[in-house]
Image (cartoon, helix red, strand yellow):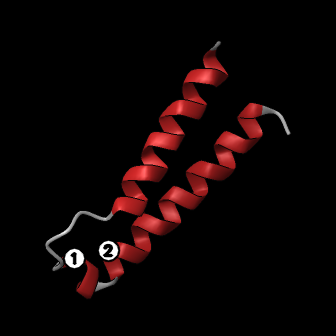
């Protein structure tokens, strides 16, 4: 799979996850950061960096 195709898919997933968290009030009120979103964002940055090489 070309990197840009994977990148677009990952962006769609990240957007969907963020929307779900915004809709879920329980997650909004937790003390801990949503680590899965932070991990996805880091993965997105990493893939983006490789895509630009």
| Mark toward the start of the polypeptide (1 vs 2) | 2
User: Residue at image x 53%, y 31%?
Assistant: 46
> 46 left or right of 41?
right
Residue 6, quarter of the rendered image: top right
Q: Is residue 43 above or below residue 21?
A: above
Q: Which of the two marks, 1 or 2, is nearer to us in this view?
A: 1
Mark 2 Cα-neighbour bin, 10 Å: few <14, some 14–19, many ≥20: few
Residue 42 higher or lower than 24, as above or below: above
- Horizontal placement of 17 versus 3: left or right? left
Question: Height in image: 1 above or below 51?
Answer: below
Q: Is residue 15 above or below residue 7?
A: below
Measure the alpha-carbon separation of dots 1 and 2: 7 Å
Instruction: Tell me the element at label 1.
Output: helix
Question: Residue sitting at 36 percent across and 74 percent down?
Answer: 21
Say which quadrant the C terminus sits in: top right
Element under label 2? Answer: helix
Q: Is residue 19 left or right of residue 10?
A: left
Q: Position of residue 27 (x, y in %)?
A: 27, 79
Quadrant of residue 26 within the rendered picture:
bottom left
Answer whether labels 1 and 2 touch (C-beta < 8 Å). yes
Residue occupying the far top of the picture: 53
**Residue 38 at x, y percent in the picture:** 37, 52
Tag shown at residue 2? none
Label ID, residue 22: 2
In this figure, which residue is indicated by the disc labeled 1? 28
Q: Position of residue 22 (x, y in %)?
A: 32, 74
Q: Quadrant of the N terminus?
A: top right
Closer to us: 23 or 34: 34
Residue at position x 48%, y 51% from top?
40
Residue in the picture at 55% in, 23% down: 49
Packing grade of label 1 (10 A; few <14, some 14-19, many >=20) is: few
């Amino acid at each position: 799979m070309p990197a840009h195709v994977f990148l677009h898919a990952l962006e769609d997933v990240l957007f969907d996850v963020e929307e779900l968290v915004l809709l879920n009030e329980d997650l909004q009120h937790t003390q801990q950061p949503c680590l899965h979103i932070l991990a996805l964002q880091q993965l997105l940055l990493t893939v983006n960096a490789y895509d630009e090489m």
